[in-house]
Image: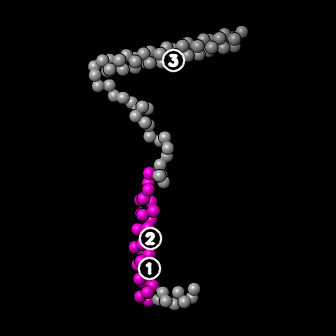
Amino acid sequence: MSQIFRKLQGGNLEVFKFGMYVLFPIGWMYYFGTNLDDRFATKGFWPTAEQSHKIPLDKEEIDQELTRMRMVDAMKRERRQAAEAQAQAQAQSQVAQSEQ
C-alpha cells in the first residue's frame, strides 16, 4: 500500500486526481442514465388507455356527457341536502332534549 502512495506523488497524483474528476461523473451518469425503465419504473403508476378519460368529440357524445355530469351533480346535491336536513333534525332534537 505504501508503494502505491509513493508512486502517487507530484505529477502522478495530479494525473490520478484528474482521472477521478473526469471518470466519477461519467460513471455516475452512466449508472443512472442506462436502463431507466426497469430501474426506476413503478408498475401501474400511469393509467392505461381504458382507465383514462375519453374526450367527447361529437355533439351527441358531448350532450350525453353533459347529461351524465348534471345527473351526478343532482345526486350529490340531493345527498348533501338530505345530510344537512338530518343534521338539522338532530340538532333540533338535541336542543329540545336539553331544554327539558
Residue 30 lies, with reference to residue 87, above or below; the image says: below
Q: Separation of disc 2 and disc 3 at Cα?
A: 61 Å
Disc on the earlier residue, 3 or 1: 1
Q: Nearer the viewer, residue 48 or 71?
A: 48
Residue 2 at what x, y percent from top left?
A: 57, 88
- SS assignment for the magenta stretch, majority: helix
Mark 1 belongs to which amino acid?
Answer: Lys
The residue identified by callout 2 is 24
Q: Separation of disc 2 and disc 1 at Cα?
A: 10 Å
The residue identified by callout 3 is 80
Residue 73 at what x, y percent from top left?
A: 43, 18
Whether tag 3 and tag 1 are in contact, CB under 8 A, the answer is no
> Where does the magenta region start and end?
10-37
**In the image: residue 87, left or right of residue 48:** right
Mark 2 belongs to which amino acid?
Answer: Phe
Quarter occupied by the N terminus: bottom right
Q: Separation of disc 3 and disc 1 at Cα?
A: 70 Å
Residue at image location 32% in from the left, 21% down from the top: 62
25 in the magenta segment: yes
Disc on the earlier residue, 2 or 3: 2
One can see residue 58 in this view = yes
Instruction: Report the number of discs.
Output: 3
Question: Is disc 2 placed on a helix, strand or loop?
Answer: helix
